[in-house]
Image (spheres, rainbow, N blue to C red):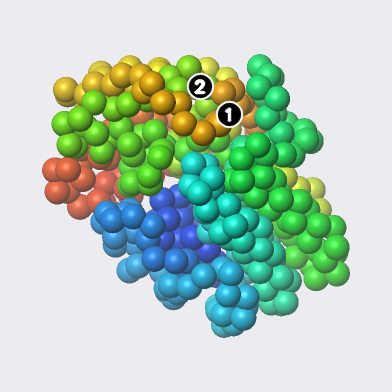
Amino acid sequence: MTMPSQSFWQGRRVFLTGHTGFKGGWASIWLHRLGAVITGYSLDPPTTPSLFQVAGVEDLVEKHHIADIRDHAGLADAMAAAAPEIVIHMAAQPLVRLSYTQPVETFDINVLGTVNVLEAARRVDSIRALVSVTTDKCYQNREWNWSYRESDALGGHDPYSASKACAEIVTAAYRSSFAARTGLAIASARAGNVIGGGDWSLDRLLPDSFAAWDQGRTTLIRRPSAVRPWQHVLEPVCGYLMLAEALVSRSTEVANAWNFGPNELDTQPVGYIQDRLVQLLPGYRWERDADEGVHEAGLLKLDSARARTLLGWQSRWSLDEALLQTATWHRAWRGGEAMLDVTRGQIAAYEALRG
């Protein structure tokens, strides 16, 4: 398995949207470790605490903009001033259940925000590659047992999923309309359900589970039989960085949509996760919630053959290992450890899995 190349990223200027978020925080820490020069553009951290705060991510970026991707002029000015070579777009409204109560804001951020990023990027001559991060939920979910491929139909039952399908269409339109003329290589990346230390988001399985454990409560689970493609956050972040490298070196071949999902055996029901947490967290307990709430997909799997074949990327941490690393990170935070060191240590352990 290949890994992001330090020789490639050393000194490379990167414009990263969403750097204050969970996944963006991990990406920032890894990019800094690789020697990249990062300009971050994002709203304030979405939670308190946050990975951004507890790991001191602000100290790792050269320029730190607290701003909104819906502000087209401000975004364009910041991107032009940064003069990056690579743009990684992660800023989003990422929560399915929140999209039911804030549908207009969800579409505004995820669709028009993506338009603003792409529009700004095509007008900055220094930019050679752009990775637009969406989600596995951009697919029209047929609740079938087959894994979705990049060529399968896009769609979305809920506002979040639909907004991400729209973002994929927008990204493809910019690639088709402007990439050849500007020399900008554009790709989109679709990952599974990510887990890892430093996620305190509402209405996500692991953050809700850790919050219940911290407070001595029983975790209530709406759909223990719902199946998801679980993976540690480092798996897709690794894919995004490798994809950006490939876009710079062989843009025509890889400027497309990409899945970064776990191995087949790690696509497991929610109840499996809960039973493992019982083993990993002393005193942890869970039970089924009688209220299933709003509609959420019951079965979703990804086919990542393209990434394995053309990028040399593959999932390396099993679900059990991902859960162990996530629980270890959370327990270290509870114990008052230096979380930037803990996070870097987990990245180093992941990098050591070359082969």
- Is residue 256 positioned above or below 315 on the image? below
Badge 2 element: loop
- The answer to which quarter of the image holds residue 297 is top right
Disc 1 residue type (three-letter): Ala
Residue drawn at (44%, 66%), measured in percent from left and top? Answer: 43
| Residue pointed to by mark 1 | 297
Cα distance between the residues tagged 2 and 1? 7 Å
For the point 16% across and 22% down, which residue is it?
A: 283
User: Which one is in front, 226 or 151?
Assistant: 226
* Viewer-nearest residue: 150 or 343: 150
Pointer 2 residue: 226
Badge 2 or badge 1: first in the primary sequence: 2
**Residue 302 at x, y = what percent?**
63, 29
Asked if labels 1 and 2 touch by Cβ distance under 8 angstroms, the answer is: yes
Residue 273 placement, left or right of 7: left
Question: Which corner quadrant of the image does residue 262 belong to?
Answer: top right
Residue 51: mark: none
> How far across and down, in percent of the image, does residue 325 sit?
32, 34
* Kind of residue indicated by mark 2: Ala
